Image (cartoon, rainbow, N blue to C red):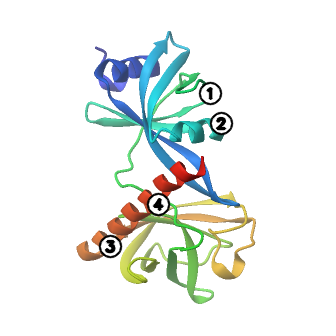
Amino acid sequence: MTATNELSPPEALRYLKDKGLPLIVSFHLEEEKGHIITGKGLCYVEEVYGSSRVKLGRFSPFRSMHAARSSGNFYATFEIGSNTYGCVIENITADRSFLVADIPARMSPFLRKFLRVEPSKKAPVLLHLMTEIQGTTAYYVRDISERGIGFIAPMPPGVPNKTICGIYMPLDGGTIILSTGVIVYTREVSERKGPGIRPSHSGGTHGISFGIQLFPHPEDEKKIRLYVMQRELEIRKKIQEQL
């Protein structure tokens, strides 16, 4: 077999089929009107048609197949050896229990180690930061994992690269933890109305997206992990109920 880091997408998909290894699929899901989150499921490669099309089946939960199809495209990750890869699956056609799609032109290493979820609109996670312009300011959290948090500000808030994060989670009636954080990326985005902009500017349509790496105390990391697991179960239940 070709070395892992030299596999083409068709070869990688054939390898997954031969070994019976799953793909994790991630797709957009409207939890509430205007509030888009990421749903996840598992599927398997059933057939590879040359270098052009792939047949995916055995979706779990089964209704994740319908959500992935409705999204128009979805992101898939899979493991080969000790490496994890990701790719975008597009041009989807559906059968009763299968999806057939284009084999992606390329796949890339997937480096994220921790499960990341988007909070509920009804029970948000809030990030409190000390800013240069407005002092302590609260932002709706866009996504969170054990070691990372993302949010969108309507303007550069003037936060130092290394900062203290106060994180409120709707866990056990309300839990607040403190963690050192380091800003690892910023980028300008166009943002739909809703969670993402801090509460007093929730109707904004433009902002700066921030990613912060967290370094929580081990006991606080357990609390984040518990929240993430509970939220992931909520999303899986939503997939079953909504479709």
Distance in Å between CA atoms under marks 4 and 2:
23 Å
Mark 3 lies on residue: 223
Residue at point 53%, 22% (across, down): 103
Callout in the foreground (4, 2): 4
Neighbour class for label 3 at 10 Å: few (<14), some, many (≥20)? many
- Asked whether residue 8 is in view, the answer is no
In the image, is 236 to the left or to the right of 225?
Answer: right
Tell whether label 1 touches label 4 (CB within 8 Å): no
The image shows residue 27 at horizontal and vertical percentages of 55, 44
Label 3 residue SS: helix
Answer with mark 3 or mark 2, whichever residue precedes in sequence. Answer: 2
Along the line of sight, the residue nearer the viewer: 243 or 174: 243
Tell whether label 3 touches label 1 (CB within 8 Å): no
Residue at point 63%, 73% (across, down): 156
Look at label 1 and name its amino acid.
Answer: Ile
Callout in the foreground (3, 4): 4
Look at label 2 and name its amino acid.
Answer: Gly
Instruction: State which quadrant residue 30 falls in.
Output: bottom right
Answer with mark 4 or mark 1, whichever residue precedes in sequence. Answer: 1
Label 1 residue SS: loop
Answer with mark 3 or mark 4, whichever residue precedes in sequence. Answer: 3
Mark 4 lies on residue: 234
Residue closest to the far bottom: 135
Look at label 3 and name its amino acid.
Answer: Lys
Answer with mark 4 or mark 2, whichever residue precedes in sequence. Answer: 2
Instruction: Please tell me the numbered disc located at residue 147.
Output: none
The image shows residue 151 at horizontal and vertical percentages of 56, 67
Tell whether label 2 touches label 4 (CB within 8 Å): no
Mark 2 lies on residue: 72
Along the line of sight, the residue nearer the viewer: 17 or 107: 17
Tell whether label 2 touches label 3 (CB within 8 Å): no
